[in-house]
Image (cartoon, helix red, strand yellow):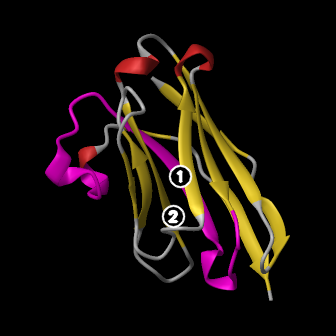
Amino acid sequence: VQLQASGGGLAQAGGSLRLSCTASGRDFSRYSMAWFRQAPGKEREFVSAIRSSGGYTYYGDSVKGRFTISRDNAKNTMFLQMNSLKPEDTAVYFCAASRTLILSQVRNGDSYNYWGQGTQVTVSS
């Protein structure tokens, strides 16, 4: 599967952005999907994940209550609605996919086999 992330841009603190990750290839509905982010000089950070059916979602502590992950399997697309943005949300956001993800490894980037190219999110104060 190939992943294409989009929707990044510049937002003010307190504002919102919606990221999309569109997948090409077959069987999108069989993949667990996730968002990670990486700020300059920092390690990659888990943001959110959603299981293949969409029934289970997971969030990093820093975004819980502000971000919402969702997916539309009919359109091969995953979304990340980001509200109440903070300057510390500034990073490149990557989408990732896995066919074999297990619950204990949801937050581990090494568990994902496929990655998109990233989209820049910049939040000004």
Number of numbered discs overlaid on the protein picture: 2
Does residue 69 lie above or below 98 as drawn?
Answer: below
Which part of the image, by quadrant, shows the N terminus? top left
Q: Is residue 64 found left or right of 84 in the rendered image?
A: left
Question: What amino acid type should be assigned to the residue bearing mark 1?
Answer: Phe
Does residue 32 lie above or below 44 as drawn?
Answer: above
Residue of label 2? 37
Residue of label 1? 94
In the rendered structure, does residue 17 fall within the stretch colored magenta? no
Picture residue at 15% right of the left edge, 53% below the top: 104
- The reply to whether callout 2 and callout 1 are in contact (CB within 8 Å) is yes
Which part of the image, by quadrant, shows the C terminus? bottom right
Residue 66 image point, x, y percent: 59, 67
Picture residue at 61% right of the left edge, 63% below the top: 92
Q: Work out how far the residue at label 2 is from the one at label 1, CA to CA, in angstroms.
A: 6 Å
Find residue 6 and report its image quarter: top right
Q: Of residues 41 and 51, which is closer to you in this image?
A: 51
Find residue 109 and report its image quarter: bottom left
Residue 24 image point, x, y percent: 55, 19
Residue 102 image point, x, y percent: 17, 41
Question: What amino acid type should be assigned to the residue bearing mark 2?
Answer: Arg
Q: Give, as a single range, the part of the protein colored magenta.
A: 83-110
Does residue 15 lie above or below 87 as drawn?
Answer: above
Lower sequence index among marks 2 and 1: 2
Decide: few, some or many residues near mark 2? Use Cα within 10 Å; few <14, some 14-19, many ≥20: many
Decide: few, some or many residues near mark 1? Use Cα within 10 Å; few <14, some 14-19, many ≥20: many
Picture residue at 68% right of the left edge, 48% below the top: 19
Check the image and name the residue furthest to the bottom: 125
Q: Of residues 16 and 5, which is closer to you in this image?
A: 16
In the rendered structure, does residue 108 fall within the stretch colored magenta? yes
Residue 73 image point, x, y percent: 53, 20
Does residue 109 lie above or below 50 as drawn?
Answer: below
